[in-house]
Image: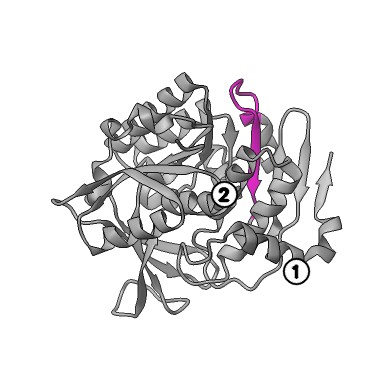
Amino acid sequence: MAEIVAFGESLVEFVATRIGQTFNSPEAFEGPFPSGAPAIFADQAARQGASVAIAGCVGRDAFGEAILRRLADDGVSISHVARCADRPTGTAFVAYRADGERQFVFNIAQSAAGLLDASGISPDLFEGCRWLHIMGSSLYNTGAIRAARAASEEARRRGCGISFDPNIRPELTGSHEAQRALWETLEICDLFLPSEADLRFFHPKLGRDEVIRKVLERPSLEAVVLKRGAAGSLYVDRKRRIEAQGFEVTEIDPTGAGDCFCGTFLACLVRDVPVEQALVRANAAGAMAVLRRGPMEGNSSKSELDDFIAARSANLPSVLTSK
């Protein structure tokens, strides 16, 4: 039984060792690091004390073993992750530009992860579930989109909430089918967790607050939680607006910060932590995530997060702004 259910791509990641490095010539990369946005999210939520299950598919190879071992060691139920002997575990290569943006090369659709479809979404996955978490990066092919629909239908049948992190990756979600699936998921979610760049994808001509007001017109949507990176986060529902400042840190690797934010925020929700505290903890998790190289290496336990926040407690009185 899991309070939080995630599904999608589990892969290993190789990261550039030098800022400004490209894929145009031979360069050094570090890895393999266990990765995949749903896997990072699930790992962080479990480390924060929530019961979490993930569905997906990895190869019957050393990369797949590394991912499953990491997730299981951190408390994620992996019983719904299939093992495929005919395809390798998915991979990603990441390069970092001087302006802070990243460039990705993914092998997901043709890997074991590309085999995920509706048949991988078993009803017993949702026993005791309170939240289904959908990542936009997981809508990478027809099978995965069908899996998302099957999971959403079962979540609704069980009375689970649906949280949605668009996590827009042009390398994965550039097709018309994937973009349509992003809009479909927005229409059915209860909790919307975009970044500022994600907001621009949905309504490129509107300002931030206009987009938030527009998406909140959907009857199913209860709240928007905007991830703002180092600037913190913003929670908006039909009655409240709460801003939480970010934590100042020296960034080493931004990959996984948004996933850690979402994993922490959802773990707080299932523990009935007030939104104000959940935002602070999620901001702290995102800040901790960028302090180590590797997408899952900056994930944090509840006690590590407590210590991080306590060390900066002098700044906390000014962190929250409510309206």
The answer to whether residue 295 is left or right of residue 86 is right
The answer to whether residue 11 is left or right of residue 290 is left
State the residue at coordinates (42%, 58%).
Answer: 73
Please tell me which residue lies in front, 219 or 317. Answer: 317
The answer to whether residue 291 is left or right of residue 23 is right
Screen quadrant of the N terminus: top left
Residue 215 magenta-drawn?
yes
State the residue at coordinates (55%, 73%).
Answer: 252
Residue hosting label 2: 49
State the residue at coordinates (62%, 58%).
Answer: 285
Number of the label disc, if any, that sits on residue 9: none
Nearest-to-viewer mark from 1 and 2: 2
**Mark toward the start of the polypeptide (1 vs 2):** 2
The number of discs equals 2
Whether residue 172 is situated above or below residue 150 in the rendered picture? below
Q: CA distance from mark 1 to mark 2?
A: 21 Å
Screen quadrant of the C terminus: top right
The answer to whether residue 310 is left or right of residue 159 is right
Mark 2 packing: few (<14 Cα in 10 Å), some, or many (20+)?
some
Q: Which residues are magenta?
A: 214-228
Residue 188 in the image: x percent, y percent? 51, 26
Please tell me which residue lies in front, 25 or 298. Answer: 298
Q: Give the residue type at disc 2.
A: Gly
Residue hosting label 1: 311
Image quarter for residue 215? top right
Residue 239 in the image: x percent, y percent? 78, 29
Say what secondary structure mark 1 lies in: helix
Residue 139 in the image: x percent, y percent? 37, 40
Whether residue 198 is situated above or below residue 189 in the rendered picture? below
